[in-house]
Image: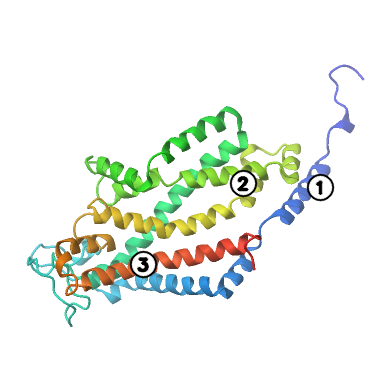
Amino acid sequence: MTAGATDPAATPSVAAAAARAELIDEVQSIESPRSARRIARRLLHNPASLLGTVLLVGFAAIAVAAPLLAPCPDDARSGRRCRDSVYLVPKYGFSKEPRPPSAEHRFGTTTDQYDIYYGVVWGTRTAFIVGIVITSLALVIGLTVGSISAYYGGWIDEILMRIVEVFQAFPFLLAAITLATILRSLPQVQGVLPAMLALVAFGWTGYARLIRADILSVKQREYVWAARSVGASDFRIITRHVLPNAIFPVLVLASLNIGTIVLSFAALSFFGLGVPDGYADWGQMIASARQRVPSLVNDWYIVVFPGLAITLFSLSWNLIGDAFRDILDPRLAR
């Protein structure tokens, strides 16, 4: 055989490559986590997760039915029509004395005369948008950084992990308050964006570290080496073989963090950094009670209704996340 010639026996045939690809999928199916159907069945048979699911479904129903439960009235004085912004809570007067629950105002009004019932109902939509959007963005950033760091290793891993450590060096809520304050001073970033961007900026690091630790273990398994041997690209290996077998702990953390994100956003709103004035947000409604601290025994409704909504919403996500963790972690399974 002349130099540079190719030995046909050394070149794998198309059939052999297909057989090896099938072997990869078979091995991966053995290593993969439990099926989604089985996980859903066990979640519904877990009392804690069942309670969390019922609470979450209830909040989802309120969010969907908000136009029916709390129709948005037109404001003749300001000229605002309902369809212009349904998230603006109706205001009834300019008195600083809150009104107790009545037939006209089911949950009463705040010190700024915002209707609490309307704010609680439409605030459910705000909570879902804030919790899911912020968590999803932080999750995507964390998965991207952690996956690249763990898969390639070396100097890439060192640089990315040092960046993660820099972000984690700041206290989460204090850093979010500082960044939200800076962003609110920019005319290009207004509304709910400053608070959401601030929480995303400091909320992705936990996902990055967790997925990195899992991928460092998963990338050494047989089906990953088999995929490399057949010439699969790095992108395909990460998205098809590595992430599906390492992502479940991160999803558990994300489900637990949604409730925390809603609480953090409510804290920013309490300090006046979350949403614009008059927006349907639970944290902002509780903030109006600061002026009535000495008389909260009589004006209890200002705090109780939005506070109960925040508590139950966060509790529902925490119950589901705890049960999800117990199901996926064999060390915690009963």
Image location of residue 156, percent across then percent down:
56, 30
Q: Which residue is mark 3?
A: 311
Mark 2–mark 1 Cα distance, whole angstroms, equals 28 Å
Inter-mark Cα distance, 1 to 3: 54 Å
Q: Residue lying furthest bottom in this view? A: 103
**Crowd rating for badge 1 (residues with CA inside 10 Å; few <14, some 14–19, many 20+):** few
Determine if residue 72 is in view. no
Label 2 environment density (alpha carbons within 10 Å; few <14, some 14–19, many ≥20): many
Query: Is 186 positioned to the left or the right of 6 in the image?
Result: left
State the image quarter where residue 111 is shown: bottom left
Mark 1 residue type: Ala
Marked residue nearer the N-terminal end (2 or 1): 1
Q: Secondary structure at mark 3?
A: helix
Of 230 and 277, nearer the camera is: 277
Residue at label 1? 19
Front position among marks 1 and 3: 3
14 in relation to 135, above or below: above
Q: Position of residue 117 (x, y in %)?
A: 24, 73
Q: Quadrant of the N terminus?
A: top right
- The answer for how far apart the CA atoms under marks 2 and 3 are is 32 Å
Q: Amino acid at mark 3?
A: Thr
The answer, for residue 114, to whether it is visible in the render is: yes
Residue at coordinates 34% horizontally, 73% vertically from top-left? 65
In the shown orientation, is residue 82 left or right of residue 63?
A: left
Q: Earlier in the sequence, mark 2 or mark 3?
A: 2
Left/right placement of residue 146 relative to residue 59 reads: right
| Residue linked to disc 2 | 214
Secondary structure of the residue carrying tag 1 is helix
Helix, strand or loop under label 2: helix
